[in-house]
Amino acid sequence: SPQCNLAGTWVNDLGSKMVIGTTNEDGQFSGSYLTAVSAATDAAIRESPLHGRQHHTNRRAQPTFGMTVIWSFSDSTTVFVGQCFVDEKGEETLETTWLLREEVATHADDWKANRIQLLTNLR
Ligand SMILES: O=C(CCCC[C@@H]1SC[C@@H]2NC(=O)N[C@@H]21)NCCc1cc([N+](=O)[O-])ccc1O
């Protein structure tokens, strides 16, 4: 069965673009994320670094993974957890759930620090 490899370029329905390099023998990968959208009203959107880890495709055909994006233009961080799917034509799709936390001024403001989005398709 064709292995589902995270390396390459991915786009999602928001128009964001993610570029991932080769995965090493531990399943670690890195790349960059150019989001098409942001809730940080004042900042100009810039490419942001990402680092993640997947189950290795030499053991799993459709591996799960996790990855972190440290936004370069906003005091916030997004973590994605997802799985890579391959259809009968070899088309690959990443289904992910993400959680975004923005830095807030005080602990009392912690209630508004999280944003969560269930399932978005990154391809
Ligand atoms: O926007 C970001 C970073 C980009 C997140 C893009 C997401 S990641 C999942 C989804 N998929 C995708 O492609 N793009 C989106 N941080 C805003 C934090 C923030 C919010 C407020 N506020 O809400 O008031 C104020 C000041 C702030 O710094």
Image (cartoon, grey):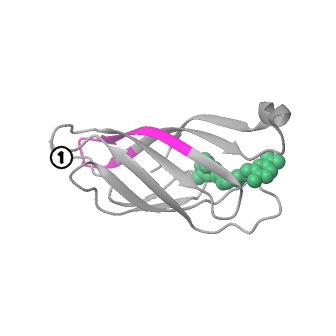
Quadrant in the picture for the N terminus? top left
Query: Which image quarter: residue 93?
Result: top left
- Residue 102 forms part of the magenta stretch: no
**Ligand 1 has an atom within 8 Å of the beta carbon of the residue at disc 1:** no
Indicate whether 50 appears above or below 109: below
Q: Residue at x 48, y 57 (%)?
A: 50
Q: Which residues are magenta?
A: 79-93
The image shows residue 115 at horizontal and vertical percentages of: 69, 37
Q: Residue at x 36, y 46 (%)?
A: 53
- Residue 87 forms part of the magenta stretch: yes
Residue 39 makes an appearance in the image: no
| Residue type marked 1 | Pro
Q: Residue at x 51, y 49 (%)?
A: 68
At numbered mark 1, what does the secondary structure look like: helix, strand or loop?
loop
Label 1 sits on residue: 2
Q: How many marks?
A: 1
Q: Nearer the viewer, residue 107 or 11?
A: 107
Q: Residue at x 32, y 58 (%)?
A: 7
The image shows residue 52 at horizontal and vertical percentages of: 41, 49
Relative to 82, is 34 on the left or the right? right
Q: Nearer the viewer, residue 122 or 80?
A: 80
Relative to 4, is 38 on the left or the right? right
Query: Which image quarter: residue 56?
Result: top left
For the stretch drawn in magenta, the main secondary structure is strand
Among all residues in the image, which is located at the extreme front? 107
Residue 72 makes an appearance in the image: yes
Badge 1 density bin: few <14, some 14–19, many ≥20, Cα 10 Å: some
The image shows residue 49 at horizontal and vertical percentages of: 51, 62
Indicate whether 46 appears above or below 68: below
